[in-house]
Image: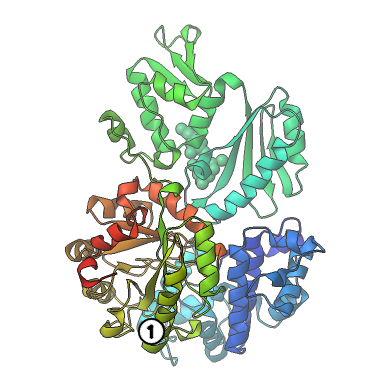
């Protein structure tokens, strides 16, 4: 569930630019409301699947909806009915079906749905049994311990709900980098197609590749700032101009996102790019180092201070490019992803900035699903897509049986799938398909698939999907237990967080790192833009402990393979190099990392 649909009821007044993310949010809301009403689970699931398909689309659903030669049902997982609804949503910005659904539940119930850990079913129970419709009533009921009396609720649930209410109240409106990217690219293309743009860049947290973005910061070099700002104001997606000056303008888009535009002289472009890329903390250190050298840095350039605080004596020494700005202070150019005032200046002082991992370093993808569980595309289609992306190997890791809603596989079905993979491998050229599974770590601890079956896999990722509200010691013990299983290769999405939607479960990551190190296991950086789990800081911590990271897509469709770029960016923010990432190695080398080599013969 996203919180944007609750906070942003007004957004539906506008229909310009229904982004895929917004359409997906609406579909999720439909699923929530249906579930709240106790609708057929398969119907609910169809909307959730639809939301994911739309979120993963590499092109705007709105463009398909408006193109008479295209049809949304081209996408696997979108049937005729869903296709009609998306069409209406994308082209008109609203959907009568959704409006009807909403009319049937009290508006304030929508707020209940967004409490992490509550969900539509529990919200329905609270509504029915305790007539709760507002967060205030819910808080009171929890504090009066009336909630724990209900079937399916416990004292723990009350604590969780109370924490959830606080989280929902402070929930921010930051959007995923992937969403900001779609908006930023469209805007840059639009501006660039107009008159008078000599240079254009997006700075700020977007350029640093942060997992969420507060606002966009555009920099432009132009001989005619007014022309550029006029055109900016005319952009379809602009809801209102917040402020406009001679060279600076801020607007709000229909989605609520703010965009700041600054027009700067060419000789200041590098300085402005450096300044507005930030981070603020990185720039504070930079200015300090400059000052020690008798220099001053601001958004216009680097200046030598001749006199004592006499502005007339300042002499411009650099500013046209970022490289020359840093060079003027005897510093190397820093990749934007590491400008967070963590280790970067220390590395620079030692002359060893890391060579950050890049997309072309990736050789394989070790987490993906097919139609055998809850994927949208067949085994063959996933292989073909991986081949066309130039991957040398992939692991097919469908869900295990515990995940029944995803049609998870038992040992028998896994063996059938693996037999099929063996057959396919005999004729495949240039790619190798690994027999894998995403095995659930069950609530009580053991794995969802017997060891004899796991022993036949090339690659096993273990993950926690159930019992996420257990205490820290219990969840940690489950994960450490999985790490100790000799057949497990890696732990998938190790903290379980969903950005803006669900907090990480309680887990002692240090203990997980320790166990992974001791038992030679790997940890995943899941590239899904809503997960990015491990995060940047955790990746750096894993590296410090010598744990190799696997960057995986967790693709549920062929399109899902494209999200690898978000994972790469997060790894770069963590300062990781090619050597720190396991799947930059050929499979035969990677296999040795997980100690599987001795057990296998080709
Ligand atoms: P966001 O938008 O919250 O995702 O994060 P940023 O980093 O894009 O922050 P934003 O948009 O407020 O400002 C962009 C950059 O401009 C920021 O990283 C550093 C620079 N900057 C902005 N305001 C200030 C300021 O008051 N002092 C300093 N030193 N730098 C600033
Ligand atoms: Ca910003
Ligand atoms: Ca800004
Ligand atoms: Zn998965």
Q: Kindly indicate the quadrant of the structure image that contains residue 63.
A: bottom right
Residue sitting farthest toward the front: 427
Q: Quadrant of the C terminus?
A: bottom left
137 vs 181: above or below: below
Determine whether, in the image, residue 381 is placed left or right of residue 364. right
What is the x, y in percent for residue 352? 28, 33
What is the x, y in percent for residue 525? 38, 59
Determine whether, in the image, residue 573 is placed left or right of residue 188. left
190 vs 267: above or below: below
Determine whether, in the image, residue 404 is placed left or right of residue 469. right
Q: Quadrant of the N terminus?
A: bottom right
Q: Which colour scheme appears in the figure?
A: rainbow
Mark 1 secondary-structure assignment: helix
Residue at 42 percent of width and 58 percent of height = 392
Camera-side residue: 483 or 165? 483
Q: Kindly indicate the quadrant of the structure image that contains residue 187.
A: top right
Residue 177 in view: yes
How crowded pointer 1 is (Cα within 10 Å; few <14, some 14-19, many 20+) is rated as some
286 vs 597: above or below: above
Q: Which residue is mark 1?
A: 415
Residue 176 in view: no
Determine whether, in the image, residue 429 is placed left or right of residue 346. right
Q: Kindly indicate the quadrant of the structure image that contains residue 545.
A: bottom left
Residue at 45 percent of width and 38 percent of height = 336
Total numbered labels placed on residues in the image: 1
What is the x, y in percent for residue 206? 53, 45
Camera-side residue: 22 or 420? 420
What is the x, y in percent for residue 139? 47, 76
Camera-side residue: 136 or 394? 394
CB of mark 1 near ligand 4 (< 8 Å):
no
Residue sitting farthest toward the left: 518
């Amino acid at each position: 569930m996203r919180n944007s649909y609750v906070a942003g009821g007004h957004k539906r007044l506008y229909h310009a630019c229904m982004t895929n993310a917004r359409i997906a949010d609406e579909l999720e809301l439909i699923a929530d409301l249906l579930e709240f009403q106790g609708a057929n689970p398969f119907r609910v699931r169809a909307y959730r699947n639809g939301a994911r398909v739309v979120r993963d689309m590499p092109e705007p659903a709105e463009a398909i909806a408006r193109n008479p030669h295209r049809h949304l049902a081209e996408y696997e997982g979108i049937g005729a009915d869903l296709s009609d609804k998306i069409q209406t949503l994308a082209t008109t910005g609203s959907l009568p079906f959704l409006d009807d659904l909403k009319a049937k539940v009290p508006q304030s119930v929508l707020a209940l749905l967004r409490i992490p850990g509550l969900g539509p079913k529990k919200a329905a129970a609270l509504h029915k049994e305790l007539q709760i419709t507002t967060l205030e009533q819910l808080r009171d009921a929890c504090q009066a311990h009336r909630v724990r009396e209900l079937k399916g609720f416990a004292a723990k649930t009350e604590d969780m709900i109370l924490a959830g209410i606080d989280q929902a109240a402070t929930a921010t409106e930051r959007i995923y980098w992937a969403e900001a990217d779609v908006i930023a690219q469209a805007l840059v293309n639009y501006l660039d197609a107009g008159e008078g743009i000599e240079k254009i860049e997006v700075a700020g947290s977007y350029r640093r590749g942060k997992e969420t973005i507060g606002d966009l910061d555009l920099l432009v070099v132009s001989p005619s700032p007014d022309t550029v700002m006029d055109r900016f104001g005319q952009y379809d997606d602009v809801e209102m101009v917040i402020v406009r000056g001679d060279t600076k303008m801020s607007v709000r888009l229909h989605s609520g996102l703010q965009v700041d535009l600054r027009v700067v002289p060419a000789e200041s472009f590098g300085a402005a790019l450096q300044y507005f890329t930030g981070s603020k903390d990185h720039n504070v250190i930079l200015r300090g180092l400059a000052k020690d050298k008798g220099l001053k840095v601001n958004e216009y350039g680097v200046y030598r201070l001749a006199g004592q605080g006499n502005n007339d004596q300042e002499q411009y020494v650099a500013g046209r490019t970022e490289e020359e700005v840093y060079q003027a202070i005897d510093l190397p150019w820093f990749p934007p992803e590491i400008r967070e005032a963590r280790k970067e200046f220390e590395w620079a002082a030692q002359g060893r900035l890391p060579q950050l991992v890049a997309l072309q370093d990736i050789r394989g993808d070790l987490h993906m699903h097919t139609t055998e569980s809850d994927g949208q595309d067949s085994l063959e289609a996933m292989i073909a897509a991986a081949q066309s992306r130039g991957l040398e190997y992939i692991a097919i890791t469908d869900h295990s049986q515990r995940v029944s809603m995803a049609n998870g596989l038992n040992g028998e079905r896994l063996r059938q799938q693996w037999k099929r993979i063996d057959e396919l491998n005999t004729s495949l050229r240039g790619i190798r398909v690994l027999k894998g599974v995403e095995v659930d770590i069950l609530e009580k601890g053991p794995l969802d698939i017997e060891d004899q079956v796991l022993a036949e896999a090339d690659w096993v990722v273990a993950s926690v999907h159930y019992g996420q509200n257990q205490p820290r010691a219990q969840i940690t013990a489950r994960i450490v237990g999985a790490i100790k299983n000799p057949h497990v290769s890696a732990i998938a999405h190790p903290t379980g967080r969903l950005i803006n939607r669900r907090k990480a479960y309680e887990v002692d990551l240090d203990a997980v790192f320790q166990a992974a190190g001791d038992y030679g296991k790997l940890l995943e950086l899941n590239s899904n833009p809503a997960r990015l789990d491990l995060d940047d800081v955790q990746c750096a911590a894993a590296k410090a402990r010598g744990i190799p990271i696997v960057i995986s897509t967790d693709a549920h469709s062929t399109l899902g393979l494209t999200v690898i770029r978000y994972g790469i960016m997060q790894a770069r923010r963590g300062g990781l190099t090619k050597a720190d990432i396991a799947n930059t190695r050929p499979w035969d080398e990677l296999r040795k990392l997980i100690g599987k080599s001795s057990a296998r013969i080709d």
